[in-house]
Image (spheres, rainbow, N blue to C red):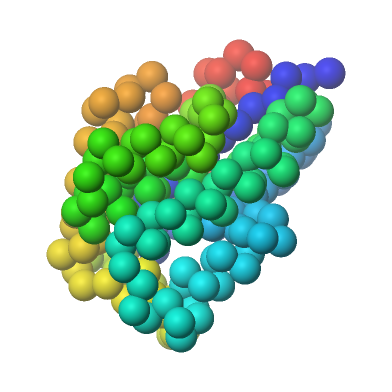
Amino acid sequence: MSAGFLLSFEGSEGCGKSTQIALLRARLEAAGRSVVVLREPGGTELGESIRHLLQHAKEGASMTSETELLLFAASRAQLVREKIRPLLEAGTFIILDRFLDSTTVYQGVARGLSLESVRAINHFAIGGTLPHLTLVLDMDSATARSRIHQTGRELDRIESQPQAFFEKVRQGYLDVALQEPGRVKIIDASATPEAVHESIWQIITAQSHAV
């Protein structure tokens, strides 16, 4: 049985995560891997309820940054124990649409909460279950924002933040990659979807037990 592998995708809204996750999933399955895609917040029944509260519920309009941080952590703690750990034990390749680095960047850097507190809460939520690899899809914040608006859909509570917020998000991810170069890799997301996918595939196949 293949060893389980935990891969997280990160990046600002509009960077193309959904497209790249779908392309990678199809290629991994064609190569014979068992693949499960999970999203954050969400991925469990409880987590999906938290996701709605964080993103769309009218009650969330007055949410403080501290509350936001703790709700993300609650969803993550449930996901790790209910889904991620059992799937890894079963040899599954897990693709996460966001994980702990989102909290570090969005709530710690962009919201301005204490990074020491954010790291402690992240550590408590994941209980040592770190991704084997994290891919950050990077592009300038203005281009990413324009992609979101081009969809024509209603923006959620996070997507509605001002441009300056997303500039902090981008820099936060670049800083995380500098701090953890072994785990976190930056991908230029401004290229064509096909070129971005090939860059991702090269990194994945370099991990001896990933494919």
Q: Is residue 158 left or right of residue 115?
A: right
Q: Is residue 6 left or right of residue 198?
A: right
- Residue drawn at x 55%, y 47% is 76
In the image: residue 63, left or right of residue 20: left
Q: Quadrant of the C terminus?
A: top right
Quadrant in which residue 158 is drawn: bottom left
* Outermost left residue: 164
Q: Considering only vertical position in the picture, is 142 above or below 2? A: below
Q: Is residue 66 above or below residue 5?
A: below
Image position, residue 25 (x, y; %): 67, 44
Across and down, in percent, residue 178 comes to: 24, 28
The quadrant where residue 67 appears: bottom left
The single residue placed furthest to the top in the displayed view is: 208
Tell me what residue is drawn at x 24 percent, y 58 percent: 111
Q: Residue 194 versus residue 53: which sits nearer the camera?
A: 53
Identified at 23% across, 51% down, the residue is 113
